[in-house]
Image (spheres, rainbow, N blue to C red):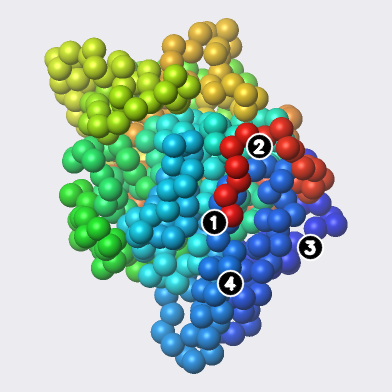
Amino acid sequence: MSGPDPAEDPTALHRLSATDARQMIATGELSPVELLEACLARTDAVDPAVNAMVTRADERARVEAQAAADAVARGDEIGVLHGLPVAIKDLQATAEIVTTLGAVDRVDHVPDADSGIVARVRAAGGIVLGKTNIPERSIGANTVNRLFGATGNPFDPDRSCGGSSGGSAVALAAAMVPLATGSDHGGSLRIPACFCGVVGHRATPGVVPFDERTITQTFYAVQGPMGRTVADAALLMAAITDRGVRPASGHIDPMAFPLDHSRFAALDAVDPASIRVGVSADLGGVLVSEDVRRRFRDRVERIAPLVGDVVEVPVDLRNAADVDWRLRSDVFAVQYQHEAATWDERFNPNIRATYDSALTTPMEVIAAGRRAQTELYQQFQAHFDQVDVIVTPGVSVAPFPWRELYPSTVDGVAVENYMAWLALSSGITVIGHPATALPCGVDDEGLPFGLQLIGPPYGDHRLLSIAAALEQAFASDPALARPHPPEPVLATARPDLIADGRQVH
């Protein structure tokens, strides 16, 4: 189940990497119009199987693709994403294109202006093909909402694709688009990337400007890139880190700092034999299934001959899940206090549970969480004196049925709340380090297995360069290489995924 179907042409335009397509557009070998039409046709063909692209902007995209082709013909200077179709997470506002946040009360919401990340995509020449599915208000490591329904895993649509950037991950894995945007609180980029066999990068907070931030100086609320390869994700980083582009709101992210965004357009060549890899199966003892632990041990054994050194690192983030819950209370109280009174009885239970907890959490508990956060940061940071990158499993469990918002148990251990099974990713959110989700083969059921690569703060370019070197090394081993969804699965429509809410076009 892990390889491309022989009947599917691997050279088809919709399968081109973003970096290859961008180079071909620049030289005139490929027209942005041809690429867009290939992506639209692919989306028409496979989205009924997975329900990832919930809003389409076909005609506007066609106009923009023609304009992009004309610019190349004139010899105009072009941006790093010139002519590339990009899917936008439905959390992020798009001018004149419906932006629902996966919520029934926003089904007809059409913003007047683009959010910051979308403005940067457009300024770099990217073409918005459509919007991708999310959980309601984008909270939860799933992609199910009352408006559009569920997005199925492209390897098995009965399984979860993760979340909250699940629609973006599925659109990439199914080759509907070469690039997609996402965002990450406790793992919303990394979890769907791992569940769907694509790449997601959670940058150091402040690297990617988040102009809509509602609370300053926090490691939460990070926006970022997703791609089928590390180089593709880095190319999108080159656009969305551009400080020279501001949204129409004029808002400035108080955490953004001076940065040369163009550097991400090209990664450093890294010799895998020079990489010192630290490994941890569970960050010192957080909840991880035995099946994932076993598979991780197998991956480590396969990776060891490819790199310079592999060592177990004495990481201890066992307290991070508790700290995360305390800090989320602070964030949610700020973010949702103005709208909580409008929620109906079927509103996203993940948000309601966190918000209700926030209202009853004493300030001394939150303060203790912030102090613990600083201590965890310092302890974790010290490990990079001995290693270049720390590698963990990407997710604590394999993809589970999408009808479950989260697993109720892991190896018989009850999961306390919707965040308790996510400590592998949320623990890294707590300490604010950059992390890249990297595909690494499949499990016994043919479902993607992913790794989380963690680097030191502000070392995003170096981390992505290391991830690209490992990705290239993995490609020669079928057990480690990036998997591809089975074409027969993508050819079968799944109307059960679609909710009663209308699909927007």
User: Which mark sits nearer the N-terminus, 2 or 4?
Assistant: 4
Label 2 sits on residue: 498
Label 3 sits on residue: 9
Name the residue rendered at 59%, 85% in the picture: 28
Please indicate whether residue 13 sits to the left or right of residue 473 in the image: right
Depicted 324 relative to depicted 232: above or below = above
- Place of residue 290 in the rendered image (x, y in percent of width and height, measured from the top left): 59, 18
Query: Which quadrant is home to the C terminus?
Result: bottom right
Label 1 sits on residue: 130
Marks 1 and 3: CB-CB under 8 Å? no
Name the residue rendered at 48%, 13% in the picture: 415
User: Which mark sits nearer the N-terminus, 2 or 1?
Assistant: 1
The amino acid pointed to by label 3 is: Asp
Please indicate whether residue 166 sits to the left or right of residue 420 in the image: right
Marks 2 and 4: CB-CB under 8 Å? no
Label 4 sits on residue: 62
User: Which mark sits nearer the N-terminus, 3 or 4?
Assistant: 3
